[in-house]
């Protein structure tokens, strides 16, 4: 499976998490795996990765000076889940266009036919021998030190 298919699955899993909160184990596991997948993406996806990192997935109204037993605020959590789905879908779309560009380049390379060499094996061997002799004589000259 490629990253594209895995991200599709992770985007679909967010529907199951609508009733959960940010402290639930299933959400924490999902978030960790998505972050790991996003770290493996190449540099053109840096804006989407940073946007996903900025999502806080807060689900409590606890602020400094208020009581700890405040009522949960799932609207912020739901908004962040929706934003994460949008980000993942944007990455999937970019991935598809990148794959199409690469496939197009490969097709162009396959369509070009290169001519086969017309030289015979004996001619190639002679050329190799001549070039090796030249290298040997040149290298001996280069190794000799100059006398003053």
Image (spheres, rainbow, N blue to C red):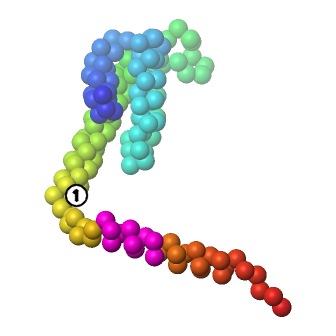
Does the magenta stretch mainly form a helix, a strand or a loop?
helix
Disc 1 on helix, strand or loop? helix
**Label 1 sits on residue:** 109
**Is residue 123 visible in the rendered structure shown here?**
yes
* In-front residue for pair 77/137: 137
* In-front residue for pair 110/24: 110
Quarter of the figure with residue 25: top left
Q: Residue furthest left?
A: 111
Q: What stretch is highlighted in magenta?
A: 121-130
Q: Residue furthest bottom?
A: 148
Q: Residue at x 19, y 55 (%)?
A: 110
Q: Residue at x 33, y 36 (%)?
A: 87
Eyeballing the image, is 82 above or below 115?
A: above
Would you say residue 16 sits in the magenta stretch? no
Eyeballing the image, is 8 above or below 138?
A: above
Give the left or right position of residue 109, taking residue 7 as reference.
left
Would you say residue 124 sits in the magenta stretch? yes
Q: Residue at x 37, y 12 (%)?
A: 20
Q: Residue furthest top?
A: 69
x and y percentages locating residue 116 in the rendered image = 22, 65
Quarter of the figure with residue 33: top left
Give the left or right position of residue 26, taking residue 144 as reference.
left
Quarter of the figure with residue 24: top left
Check disc 1: other Cα within 10 Å, few if <14, some if 14-19, many if 20+: few
x and y percentages locating residue 145 in the rendered image = 76, 81
Give the left or right position of residue 50, taking residue 16 as reference.
right
* In-front residue for pair 68/116: 116
x and y percentages locating residue 1 in the rendered image = 30, 28
């Amino acid at each position: 499976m490629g990253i594209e298919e895995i991200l599709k699955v992770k985007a679909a899993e967010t529907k199951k998490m609508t009733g959960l909160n940010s402290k639930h184990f299933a959400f924490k596991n999902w978030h960790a795996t998505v972050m790991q997948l996003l770290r493996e993406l190449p540099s053109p996806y840096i804006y989407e990765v940073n946007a996903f990192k900025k999502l806080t997935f807060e689900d409590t109204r606890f602020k400094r000076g208020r009581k700890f037993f405040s009522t949960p605020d799932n609207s912020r959590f739901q908004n962040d889940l929706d934003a994460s789905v949008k980000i993942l879908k944007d990455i999937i779309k970019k991935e598809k266009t990148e794959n199409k560009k690469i496939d197009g380049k490969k097709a162009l390379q396959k369509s070009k036919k290169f001519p086969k060499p017309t030289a015979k094996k004996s001619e190639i061997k002679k050329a190799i021998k001549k070039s090796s002799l030249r290298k040997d004589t040149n290298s001996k000259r280069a190794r000799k030190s100059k006398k003053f």
